[in-house]
Image (tube, rainbow, N blue to C red):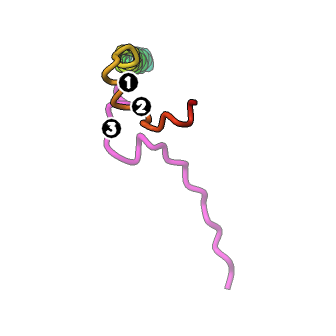
Amino acid sequence: MAKKKKTPSAPRTPAAEGPATLKDLLSSEVLGKLKAQSDELKAEENNRKELARKAVEDKRIAEQKRLENDFEHLLENSSQDWHKYK
C-alpha cells in the first residue's frame, strides 16, 4: 500500500469563511475615525466620572469642616471621660 500524498489546500481568509461583516465592508479610514471617536467618548466619560467623584469628595470635606465648627456636634460626639485629660 502506497502512501497518498496530501495536496495542501489554500489558506482561507476569515472574510471568505463566513458572511461579510461590517468591519470587512468599511474602509480603514472610516474604521480609524470610528475608533478615534470611541476613544474620545470614553475619555469624556472618564472625565465626567472623575469630576462627579471630585464634587462628592469636596462636598464631604465641606460638611466635615462645618461639623468640626459646630459646638453641639462636637459635644455629642466627644468622649465623656474627662478624667484622662486632667
Task: Looking at the picture, tell me which residue is in the foreground, 66 or 85.
Answer: 85
Q: Quadrant of residue 80?
A: top left
Q: Are marks 2 and 1 in contact (CB under 8 Å)?
A: yes
Name the residue that disc number 2 marks.
78
Q: Residue 71 location, x and y as percent?
A: 35, 18
Identify the image quadrant of the N terminus.
bottom right
Tell me the residue that label 3 is attached to.
20
Nearer to us: label 3 or label 2:
2
* Residue extent of the magenta highlight: 1-26
Q: Do tag 3 and tag 2 residues touch (Cβ < 8 Å)?
A: no
**Element assignment for label 2:** loop
Amino acid, disc 2: Ser
Label 3 secondary element: loop
Q: CA distance from mark 3 to mark 2?
A: 71 Å
Q: Give the number of the disc on residue 74.
A: 1
Q: Residue at x 56, y 36 (%)?
A: 84
